[in-house]
Image (cartoon, grey):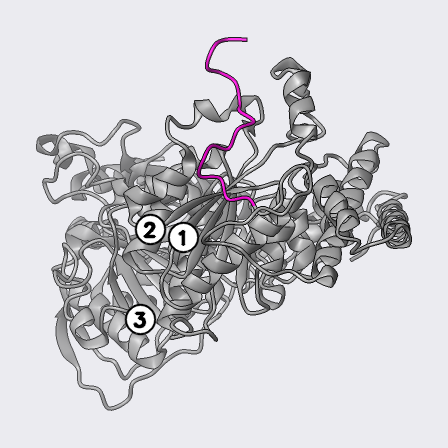
Amino acid sequence: MAAPTMEKPRTNEGAKVQTVTMAKALNMGLRAAMEADPKVLVLGEDVGKLGGVFRVTDGLQKDFGEQRVLDTPLAESGIIGTAIGLAIRGFRPVCEIQFDGFVFPGFDQIVSQLAKLHFRSQGKVKMPVVVRIPFGGGIGAVEHHSESPESYFAHTAGLKVVACSNPIDAYWMMQQAIASDDPVIFFEPKRRYWEKAQLDPGITPDPLFSSRVLRQGGSATVACYGPSVKTCLDAATAAEEDGIDLEVIDLRTLSPLDLGPVFDSVRRTGRLVLVSEAPSESSVTAEVATRVQQECFYSLEAPVLRVTGFDTPYPPSKLEEDFLPDLDRVLHAVDRSLAY
Amino acid sequence: MIAGLRATTEGGADLVQLLSPEGERVSHPAFDIEVTPEELRGLYRDMVLVRRADREGNALQRQGQLGIWVPLLGQEAAQIGAGRAMRPNDMAFPSYREHGVAWCKGIQPTDILGIFRGTDHGSWDPIATRFHLYTIVIGNQCLNAAGYAMGQRFEGKVGDDDGEATIVFFGDGATSQGDVHEGMVWSAVYDAPLVFYCQNNQWAISEPVERQTRVPLYERARGYGFPGIRVDGNDVLACLAVTRWAMDECRHGNGPVLIEAFTYRMDAHTTSDDPTRYRLSDELEAWKLKDPIERVRVHLVKQQWADQEFFDQVQAEADELAAHLREFCVNMPDPHPERIFSRVYAEESPVVRRERDEFLDYLSGFADAHAGGER
């Protein structure tokens, strides 16, 4: 299934290849979008002078001014609610929610207004708003700083939900999300902010709402997103030593899902392991498993297995290494799948 | 009746009033306006027409033509006064009872029916009319309005007499919502050209205003650092004068402003509500003496600004409007099931497309497949 393209791919020929962290790549993506369109605004807590607690907006206020990079009062409903009003006026706001666990005061505005205005007005009002949310665990933080709330948003009609996993995607997906006329909830894996990659701004990126096969293999399929992608790639490297050849797919878009590459892969391997930090019940991985069961029923050699966070509140950080899917838990699930 | 749990009929000493309930002109040091006979006849006509449309909406619900109706009875002056204070470029964010403001923005009562008949969620173009769609989640619109007004400022459309402003409508119950508070914080710190227009109609369904506040609502503005004014919400002249001033303050860059229009919900919260369970009829009788339309009628007669022919003519026009509303309502087609899937996104989602195709295919298997309705 071809992924829909809603945005013109932007290329930046002549720009030089450089090694950047994901935080820097996101920053560059924001900067490029702000340079391309004066209606793009950045708003959030501490995004101005400080450059955001993760420095993703570093230097933007200095270069674009206080009317385009707004240090807002400290209320998430206010950030989202005013972004909606700015969008009605014709702006393209990019909201930063400081941490995943702080999005819930803004949840009402996201679900009640942001997600529904296009449908309510039958397209007369567009909602080109991006809500950036650093998500996931692994940084030893206190409560409310390590959550994976993506399923709430993927469950809400009217929203689009994506998660980047590496600096290159971060750079392109940020610009594509801002160019989208639909609201996009943009999840950034915070423990990967400092991972580095070679960024070539001259290439033509994949469409935003598309998944991607990162590693080809025939033994079993592993599908994942966000912070789990690196975990799964590491697991695939380790499995290689045992002669197990894993295919790894980065879902990238959680709503709408782009499962064509997953179906193709499962039809070849007959086995699927899904990996996510979010609790498993009624989650994105639950939806993927259901769809694969519907589309690949006769190809499956084993039940779809999942490696996820537990269905508990996020634990104190001394326990997070047990809570989060790691290389061993992924390989354990692969072994169980292969043993069927 | 529990002591202290009762809405009040008294607006207090700070109440801005220009036309008394007895139809006498009252002067006010800050907000007096000159009004011509023609202007006052126009305001009277507006109020009679929106009340007549409102009563027809109520009747259409009682007769099963609408699923629900949200009456504005008693709040005609608060809405027409504010609505007529707006200029074409000014933006309004309503809650869901602002049929009178909609009228002033050129949105016909027929445009509103679909929401209450269940055929749409709002049919008008909020961008072209500068009247946002009705917002049902209490208080949400105050933040959306704050953002819009910030946008007006960022675009440089604020600062002189040609400037733009925004007005947001909400009720006394909404003032307890965090979004109203946050809207006031945002508007204040960004100097947004936004008028907060609170119609204090004394009741949030069954809860009296004393369940929302210990201080008069207009006094809350001081805590945010902008002016708050309490106006007689049943006095169309006072509402017009105060709102015009407030919008002008905003367009000149001196916003925001809070207006508390002190009024009364004469009818139920909606047609699903039964006010006899929570309020006494003597309160309603006391407010009937402050009727927003009657005082204008008395004044027009006293001043000899209108004769019987005028009143008869307005009444005939109102009846014609009501008849048209009824005719339109009963002939509204049901939407086609395809509408469920229509324009959920700007860029269609493959998920919605798949579900639509599957469902329409399923429907086509029935002999009497939903043939009616408009695609």
Q: Which one is in front, B343 or A1?
A: B343
Q: Whole-Å distance between the Cαs marked 1 and 2?
A: 6 Å
In this rendered view, identify the residue nearer to me: B301 or A161: B301
The mark found on residue B226 in the picture is 2
Residue B11: say if magenta. yes
Tags 3 and 2 touching, CB below 8 Å: no
Tag 1–tag 2 contact (CB < 8 Å): yes
Q: Amino acid at mark 3?
A: Trp
Task: Please name the residue that numbered disc 3 is placed on.
Answer: A172
Q: Is residue B304 above or below residue B298?
A: below
* SS at badge 3: helix
Q: Earlier in the sequence, mark 1 or mark 2?
A: 2
Q: Are marks 3 and 2 on the same chain?
A: no
In the image, residue B266 sits, relative to residue A203, either above or below, namely above
Residue B7 picture location, percent across and down: 53, 23
The 10 Å Cα crowd at callout 2, few under 14, some 14 to 19, many 20 or more, is some
- Relative to B199, is A168 above or below? below
For label 3, count other residues whose C-alpha is less than 10 Å away and answer few (under 14), some (14-19) or many (20+).
many
Q: Main secondary structure of the magenta part?
A: loop
Residue A202 picture quarter? bottom left
As shown in the figure, which amino acid type bears the numbered disc 1?
Val
Q: Is residue B70 visible?
A: no
Amino acid type at mark 2? Phe
On-image quarter of the C terminus of chain B: bottom right
Q: Is residue A92 magenta?
A: no
Task: Report the residue at 55% width, 44% height from top.
Answer: B17
Q: Nearer the viewer, residue B237 or A300?
A: B237
**Numbered range of the magenta stretch:** B1-17
Residue A262: x and y, percent?
A: 42, 54
